[in-house]
Amino acid sequence: MQPYKGPKTRYRCPSCNKERSFTLYIDITTGEGIANDVGRCNREINCGYHFTPKMYFEKNGGSLIKPYLKKEFSKINIESNIVKPISNISNSIFEKSLSNNKENNFIKYLEGLFGSRLTSKLIKLYSIGSSKYWKGATVFWQVDISGKIRTGKIMLYNPDTGKRIKEPINHIAWAHSALNLKDFNLKQCFFGEHLLNASANKPIAIVEAEKTAIIASVYLPEFIWLATGSLSNLNLEKFKVLSKREIYLFPDLNCYTKWKLKALEIKEALACKIFVSDFLETNASTIEKEKGYDIADYLIVRDEKFGWALSGYSYPIFWDH
């Protein structure tokens, strides 16, 4: 798939017609797209369009590998067997992003939610950074279990609502791309993975969004909260670091079935203890389901209604084993 190098490398989806949400499959010998409709929509829940090269060639009665490219592909296959070292971002860049967060919109939102004292603890715990890429932007650093900085996801939030700003563009970028790091070999890890060293016995809770992990850690501190970063990042490779841990998955509303299937796949491969929470599917209202709430959205709403935050209340989480 075409690597992300800014909004210009994301296109209008042929299915849902959403701007800058479509990633093309490209011919690696030319760098050009196979066809305008061969790719995947990043809106996995609201759209889910995914048309692969194999499907394209089967539809058009052709071979996946064109005859005149066979020599090129054999050369590429040899080169692809060479294992490249995982790239990292320097500690100096990482630490600089932590030094000035006065204009950080997401941090302002957290302060409105939890107050400055608790927010400071969350900033330190999750190494929440700030970026000048957009005014008020946040960097969610992916720090692996050995303390290496794999990359950072740059995002922009509304400081009052805590919602991502998606207009006129979807404000998401990557630190390694923003820094123009050449030949960067990215291998993502869980957001919050560095926290695994703090306790070998605490169970692990996994959600999709970085924001969700941070907020949920306040309400349910009995878990170490990690985030995949996206629905497609719930994969076996990431879970290898959790092979001996007790794992609980909290899918967003309308994602339960997909996460359940993934959990079965991971459980079989790693022989680990892994459970999927159906708490939201069971307890969320019709409106909350329509809005696609995640566990943080649910807890915030209940907190505002019942005042549960920081009360030591133990939430009733029901598990579908």
Image (tube, helix red, strand yellow):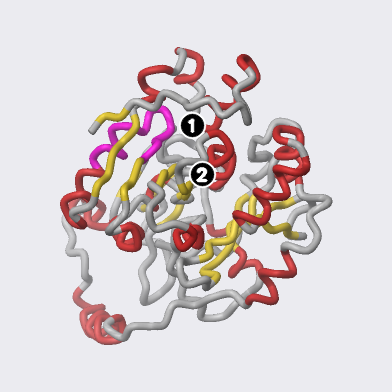
Q: Quadrant of the N terminus?
A: bottom left
Tag 2, which secondary structure? Answer: loop
Residue 110 position, x and y percent, is 70, 39
Label 1 amino acid? Asp
Above or below for 203 versus 96: above
Reply yes or no: does residue 258 show up in magenta. yes
260 magenta-colored: yes
What amino acid is found at the position of numbered circle 2 in the picture? Answer: Ala
40 sits to left or right of 273:
right
Q: Quadrant of residue 46?
A: top left
Q: Residue 161, percent across and down?
A: 70, 31
Q: From the viewer's side, name the closer residue of 302 and 14.
A: 302
Q: Which residue is mark 1?
A: 294
The segment highlighted magenta reads 249-261
Q: Residue at x 36, y 18 (%)?
A: 282
Looking at the image, do the residues carrying marks 2 and 1 touch, with CB atoms under 8 Å apart? yes
User: What residue would you read off at disc 2?
Assistant: 209
Residue at horizontal 38 percent and vertical 47 percent from the top: 203
Q: Looking at this view, is 257 or 165 the one in front?
A: 257
Residue at point 25%, 79% (across, down): 73
Vertical relation: 107 (above or below) 26:
above
Going from N to C along the chain, the mark reached first, 2 or 1, is 2
Q: Residue drawn at (70%, 42%), measured in percent from left and top?
A: 118
Badge 2: few (under 14), some or many (20 or more) residues near its Cα, within 10 Å? some
- From the viewer's perspective, tell me whether residue 73 is left or right of residue 4: left
Location of residue 256 with respect to 221 vertically, above or below: above
Disc 2 versus disc 1: distance between alpha carbons? 9 Å
